[in-house]
Structure formats: structure tokens, C-alpha cells
Amino acid sequence: MKNIFTFPNILTFCRILFTPIFIFLFLLGGQYLLWSIIVFTLAAISDFCDGYFARYLKIKSKFGSFFDPLADKILIISTFFTFYFVGIIHLWVILIIVFRDLVVTFLRLYLVKREKPLQTSYLAKSKTVIQFIAIYICFIFLILNFYFDFKHLKVYLDYFMYFVALVTLWSGIDYLVKNKKAIKCLF
């Protein structure tokens, strides 16, 4: 239990707690859009900080290794669903992200039970960064569209989201290929 309440894990908890606050402020719309972006940014910063402090303080735990990527998934997927709800991204893109994350999360759970923790690959970290960039591009689109009529630029947002879906799918395949020995034990 002592391993759970470390500073990096508290930052991970904060990221999870910021998610519904972000959604609430975002859906209020108008002047609350900026506040929702600030809350999201604090959550995104906590993602960088929890990993940094875990390495700097040499604090590693099974709990943190599992919940850090899970907190990312909760924040990112919730944000993308919120964007879908307001009509700026397609549902199929989110479904690819959700499917990939479910497969990787179940693989991670299985390997943790076998005491072979799944290491986050460089490609998976890049995927997360690209998803965060996509979210900020959506924010910029929303802000520009709020003050000006930039609906004609949505096609470029769509193209970037196709790229995000492709990278997400690729990183999921990469996990499966790199862990094929462990997956064979499932069957």
C-alpha cells in the first residue's frame, strides 16, 4: 500500500481526476473553453511529470507502471469522445484508438499477472505524443472557429486524425509483434 501513495502516483491520480473536470468545462462551451484547455494542459503536464519524478526519485511500482498509461488512455479517449460529441472528429477514429488501447491494456494485465510487465515502446510513447498534439490541434480549430468561420479547414483536421488513427493502429500491431511469445501462451 505504501508504494501506491508516491508523488508520481499522486500525479497520475490527478490526471484521472482532471478528466471529468475538463469534460464539464468543455461542454459548458463559450468562455469556459479556455478553462477546459487549461485543465487539460495541467493533466497533460502531469503525464510528463509523473514519469520524470518516478525516474528522478527512483520510485517504480507495479501500480504506477499500470496506472500511468491507463490514466493517459482515460484522458485521451475521454477527450476524443468529447470532440466527437461536438462534431469535430469521426467516431471510427475513436473506435480504432479504443480497440488498440483495450487490446494493449488486456495484454498488459495478462503480463503483469505473469510477472512480466509490458514495457512501453518508443512507438507507443510517440503515439501518445501525437494524440496530445491532435487534441491541441482540435483546440486550435475550435478557438478559431469560435471567433472566425474556419469550418473549411476541418478537412485538414480530418486528414490529421486519419494519421493519428494509423499511428495508433501501428503501435498496437507493434506491441503484438514484440510480445508474440507471451500471446502464444494465451492459446
Image: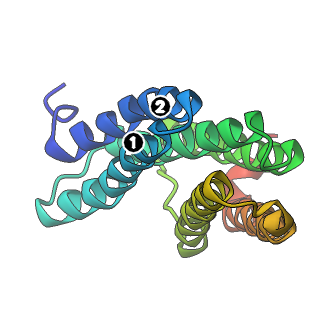
* Disc 2: CA contacts within 10 A as few (<14), some (14-19) or many (>=20): some
The residue sitting at 15% across, 40% down in the picture is 6
Mark 1 → mark 2, Cα distance in angstroms: 7 Å
Location of residue 74 by image quarter: top right
Q: Locate residue 136 relative to residue 164 in the image: left or right.
A: left
As displayed, is residue 109 above or below residue 130? above
Say what secondary structure mark 2 lies in. helix
Query: Amino acid under label 2?
Result: Leu
Front residue of 119/182: it is 119
Front residue of 44/85: it is 85
Query: Amino acid under label 1?
Result: Trp
Q: Which mark is residue 35?
A: 1
Q: Which colour scheme is used?
A: rainbow
Front residue of 23/149: it is 149
Exactly how many numbered labels are in the figure? 2
Task: Return the x and y of residue 25 as percentages of the image width and height.
Answer: 47, 31
The quadrant in which the N terminus is found is top left
Earlier-in-chain disc, 1 versus 2: 2
Residue under label 2, please give it: 25
